[in-house]
Structures are given as structure tokens and as C-alpha cells.
């Protein structure tokens, strides 16, 4: 792998240097050599070859899945849900105890009603059970892929994923862009992923190349990179996309046919406005680390639930009984891919609504009418440049990833342009000293994004402060 250090053409007040890392299959752009994680590793050669083989044997089936009949899809889901419940009861203590406590055993699972009567599981329960109580003993923890989830709560759940699930997820990712592009996506087409850390696979064999661009790189420089790459697809946070719009006149979008936004809330109206400015559709992806893809906004105009990745239920917030179609409820998901750390009737927490009457569509996947967005504040630098909330979220993820930090609760507040307060509670395996000693890295990451020095102070209170209403992890304490 060779590295080329590139100097920036950007404005003098943002003196940062992004770097390009290039290998035979890999193209990655990191915000700076100094802050780039030295430990990040993609999938092994063996993994690459398994993915290539699976692509040959499974991709057709995966591409065809959304066009099956709703009945066929439902039948397939039922088989998978039964397998997962049986597996969880047999191998995963947190589920076995939960199911035994209500007198349930897998032979009693005869209908969807039986499944929907099973107790739900929450993030807190999985946090308490991690790792022995919730990771499948079929694998040693070290041989599994790791990811983590903040969600809307600020509590960080560490998630272990098996290779087969990652491979299916990767191939379903190919299908996602194929569907969201209106079936334009081809094996030679390039995707730019502006995000926290790269996905484990940068290609599928030699096909579907995806280029990682660190979300910490300032917007003007991201535009330079995109002009070099000319990707057909970009995928990023909505706030990242928003930060690119002022540069639209300098941005060569001749190859681009779709922009996908995810992880944060954006309204249909905002996406339409951005689509008008960009001249290509801007479509939403509703996903979570726990569930992978939950629903996709597709060119037919509907949100369709990815019914081979998740089984989605919409339940009343307190009673956890199913709500009638057309009414808002909490998303409760069963991940149909991951056997290493199963999520079965997991309370995702977002509010979603099924349509009262689904519109007729060629796509057999079930539909969502709407979902409630996840909102965070953007930061602002001394020159008045906006650093999107997505970038700030990336900084937090990167800080935890690079420093191996395990946090229970977290909040970051920009008090002034150059002053940032962090309030957090570490999990027991992370000492307060470890947090304090990695403060400088957080400061460097923030400085790279803001373009000037910042002072970071970290507070570790005994009890995490609670506020009423919807939690924001990233806040700005002053107006624009
Ligand atoms: Zn549709």
C-alpha cells in the first residue's frame, strides 16, 4: 500500500492536509497522517475470496428478493426467525434466561403470534450481558468483526458480527445502490462513502469499487476529491451533503446519478431541495448498526423495509403491543443476518409508521409511511464555516475507535468556536485515566475538522445529567 501526501488547494484558514492511501483494490482518503488510525484493517484475503464466491452464487438471489411476492417474503422470514430464536435459546444466555422466565421453549414457536408474544430485548440488557451473555460461543470474540452503536440514547453498545453476515450485508449494499439508482448501478461504477471508518470490503472481487473519504475532511477538500473520483454514487450523512452544497458550482457531477443519506434525520422536503440543487435524486437509508439496513427510500416513492435483512415490528411505546397500521409506534427489529450476536425483537427506539393501506408497487417488500429523524446540531468554526453534525459524530466514533474506548453515555457541547465540553461515563473496562490520556487525540481530530486549535475539557460525572425530551448527542450552546 502506498501513500501520497497531498497538499490542499483550500482556503488558507483551513490549513489541514488530507492523505490518499492506495492499494491494489483500496482507495481511502483520511483527514491527516497524524490522526489516521494505524490499526484499521479491512477483511482478510480469505474474506475477500469468500465474498467473491458468494457474489457469484448469491447475488442473483439477493437482487431478485425485493421482487418476490409478499407471501413468499413472509414465508422466508418465518423460516429465518425460527432458526434465530432456536439458536438464541440454545446458545445465548441472555435470551435463554429471558425466554425461560416466561415459560417459553422453541418448540412452542408455531405462529407469528407466538413470536410477537416473546419478550423484547433492550440496549441496556445487551450492554449488561456483553460479551459472555450475548455473543455466540461458536466463535471466539477475537475472530468476529466489531462495530458499535450510539443510537439516540448516547449509550454505546459494542456489536460483534460474523463473516457470513458481513458478506450478506455487503451484497445487500450492492443491491441498495442498484435499487436506489433506478437499476443503473453496474459493477464498474464507483461509490464514494463519506463516513467514519471504511467498510471491511472496498470491492466485491474486482467489482463495485467503493472509495472511503473520511467525514472529517472539510467540505471544500471533499469536493476536490470528488472531482478527481467522479463517483456514480455518494453515500453520507445529510449534514455532510448539506455542507457540500455551497460548492456545487465547482463540483463535477457528470457521472453522479444518486446521493444516499443515512444515520441522521432529514425531511423529504429537504431531500427534494438538495436533489434539485444537485440534479440527481437524494434518497434516504434508514439503518442502524444493530439491524443493518431497515428501510430504503426508493425511486418508486416509497420507503420499503429490507425484509431479508430485518423483521420490523411497530409497537406501542409503553405496552409494546402492535399498533394498528397508519399509527406511530416504536421500531422493534429482528436482525436476520447476524448469528454472532443476535438481535431478536430489539427495541430500536426510533418512531416509525406503517402506511394505513400500502400503495400498489412492483416491489414486494413491505412499506413504511414515515419515520422520525435523529437530529443533532452542527458545529461552527471561527471563520463561520459550518462543520456538519455528521462530521462531529464521525470524530466521536473515530476517537473511540482509535483509542479503544468503551463508553456508557456521552454528550459533546460546543461552548464557543474554540471550546468544546465533553461529558461522559465510561464502561467498567475503560479507566478514567485512559479517557484523559486520549484527550489530545480528540483535540487533534476536532482541530483537523474545525481548522484551528480547540480546547477540549472532559467531565466524568458520577451520575449522567438527564434532560427531558429527545436527547442530542452533539449540541451547540450558541446560535449561528
Ligand atoms: Zn414502492
Image (spheres, rainbow, N blue to C red):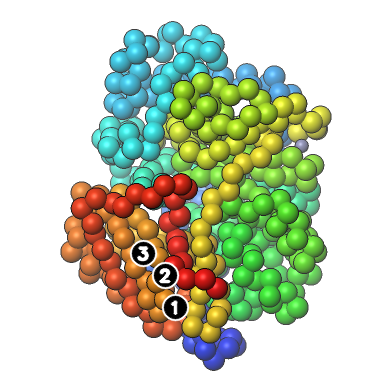
Which dot marks residue 414? 2
The quadrant where residue 441 appears: bottom left
Q: Confirm whether residue 3 shows in the render.
A: no
CB under 8 Å between discs 1 and 2: yes
Q: Label 3's element?
A: helix
Q: Label 2's element?
A: strand
At a point 66% along the width and 43% down the height, the residue shown is 296
Q: Confirm whether residue 437 shows in the render.
A: yes
Q: How far across and down, in percent of the image, does residue 449 sit?
A: 47, 75
> Alpha carbon of mark 3 to alpha carbon of mark 2: how far?
17 Å
**Which is more toward the observer, 373 or 335?**
373
Q: Is residue 44 left or right of residue 195?
A: left
Q: How far across and down, in percent of the image, does residue 101 sit?
A: 30, 15
The quadrant where residue 308 appears: top right
Of the 4 image quadrants, the one containing the C terminus is: bottom right
Against 448, residue 73 (above or below) is: above
Q: Which residue is mark 1?
A: 417
Instruction: Count neighbours of disc 2 (C-alpha within 10 A) and say few if under 14, some if 14 to 19, many if 20 or more.
Output: many
Q: Is residue 16 left or right of residue 442?
A: right
Disc 3 or 2, which lies upstream in sequence? 3
Q: How far across and down, in percent of the image, does residue 458 sit?
A: 28, 66
At a point 67% along the width and 35% down the height, the residue shown is 368
Q: How far across and down, in percent of the image, does residue 211 sit?
A: 58, 64
Disc 1 or 3, which lies upstream in sequence? 3
Which dot marks residue 399? 3
Amino acid at each position: 500500500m502506498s501513500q501520497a501526501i497531498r497538499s490542499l488547494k483550500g482556503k488558507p484558514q483551513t490549513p489541514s492536509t488530507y492523505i490518499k492511501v492506495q492499494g491494489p483494490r483500496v482507495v481511502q482518503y483520511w483527514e491527516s497522517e497524524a490522526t489516521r488510525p494505524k490499526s484499521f484493517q479491512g477483511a482478510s484475503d480469505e474474506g475477500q475470496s469468500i465474498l467473491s464466491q458468494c457474489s457469484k452464487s448469491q447475488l442473483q438471489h439477493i437482487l431478485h428478493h425485493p421482487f418476490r411476492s409478499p407471501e413468499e417474503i413472509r414465508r422466508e422470514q418465518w423460516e429465518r426467525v425460527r432458526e434465530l430464536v432456536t439458536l438464541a435459546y440454545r446458545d445465548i444466555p441472555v435470551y435463554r434466561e429471558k425466554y425461560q422466565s416466561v415459560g417459553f421453549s422453541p418448540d412452542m414457536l408455531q405462529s407469528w403470534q407466538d413470536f410477537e408474544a416473546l419478550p423484547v430485548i433492550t440496549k441496556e440488557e445487551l450492554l449488561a450481558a456483553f460479551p459472555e451473555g450475548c455473543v455466540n460461543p461458536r466463535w471466539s470474540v477475537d475472530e468476529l468483526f466489531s462495530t458499535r452503536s450510539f443510537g439516540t440514547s448516547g449509550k454505546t453498545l459494542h456489536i460483534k458480527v460474523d463473516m457470513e453476515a458481513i458478506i450478506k450485508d455487503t451484497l445487500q449494499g450492492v443491491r441498495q445502490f442498484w435499487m436506489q439508482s433506478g437499476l443503473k448501478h453496474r459493477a464498474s461504477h464507483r461509490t464514494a462513502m463519506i463516513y467514519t471508518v471504511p467498510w471491511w470490503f472496498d470491492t466485491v472481487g474486482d467489482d463495485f469499487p467503493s472509495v472511503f473519504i473520511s467525514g472529517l475532511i472539510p467540505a471544500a477538500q471533499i469536493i476536490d476529491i470528488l472531482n478527481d473520483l467522479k463517483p456514480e454514487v455518494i453515500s453520507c450523512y445529510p449534514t455532510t451533503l448539506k455542507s457540500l452544497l455551497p460548492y456545487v458550482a465547482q463540483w463535477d457531477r457528470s457521472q453522479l446519478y444518486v446521493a444516499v443519506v443515512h444515520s441522521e434525520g432529514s425531511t423529504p422536503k429537504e431531500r427534494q431541495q438538495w436533489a434539485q440543487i444537485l440534479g440527481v435524486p437524494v434518497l434516504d437509508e434508514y439503518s442502524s448498526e444493530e439491524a443493518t439496513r431497515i428501510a430504503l427510500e426508493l425511486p418508486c416513492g416509497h420507503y420499503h423495509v429490507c425484509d431479508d435483512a430485518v423483521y420490523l415490528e411497530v409497537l406501542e411505546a409503553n405496552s409494546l403491543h402492535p399498533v394498528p397500521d397508519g399509527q406511530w409506534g416504536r421500531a422493534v427489529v429482528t436482525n436476520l443476518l447476524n448469528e454472532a450476536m443476535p438481535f431478536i425483537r430489539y427495541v430500536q427506539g426510533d418512531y416509525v409508521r406503517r402506511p394505513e393501506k400500502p400503495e400498489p408497487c412492483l416491489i414486494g417488500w413491505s412499506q413504511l409511511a414515515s419515520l422520525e429523524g435523529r437530529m443533532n446540531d452542527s458545529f461552527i468554526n471561527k471563520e463561520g464555516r459550518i462543520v456538519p453534525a455528521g462530521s462531529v459524530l464521525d470524530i466521536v466514533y473515530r476517537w473511540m475507535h482509535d483509542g479503544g474506548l468503551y463508553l456508557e453515555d456521552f454528550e459533546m457541547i460546543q461552548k464557543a468556536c474554540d471550546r468544546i465540553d465533553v461529558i461522559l461515563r465510561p464502561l467498567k473496562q475503560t479507566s478514567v485515566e485512559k479517557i484523559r490520556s486520549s484527550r489530545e487525540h480528540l483535540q487533534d481530530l476536532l482541530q483537523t475538522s474545525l481548522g484551528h486549535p480547540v480546547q477540549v475539557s472532559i467531565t466524568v460525572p458520577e451520575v449522567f445529567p438527564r434532560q427531558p425530551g429527545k436527547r442530542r448527542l452533539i449540541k451547540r450552546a450558541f446560535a449561528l
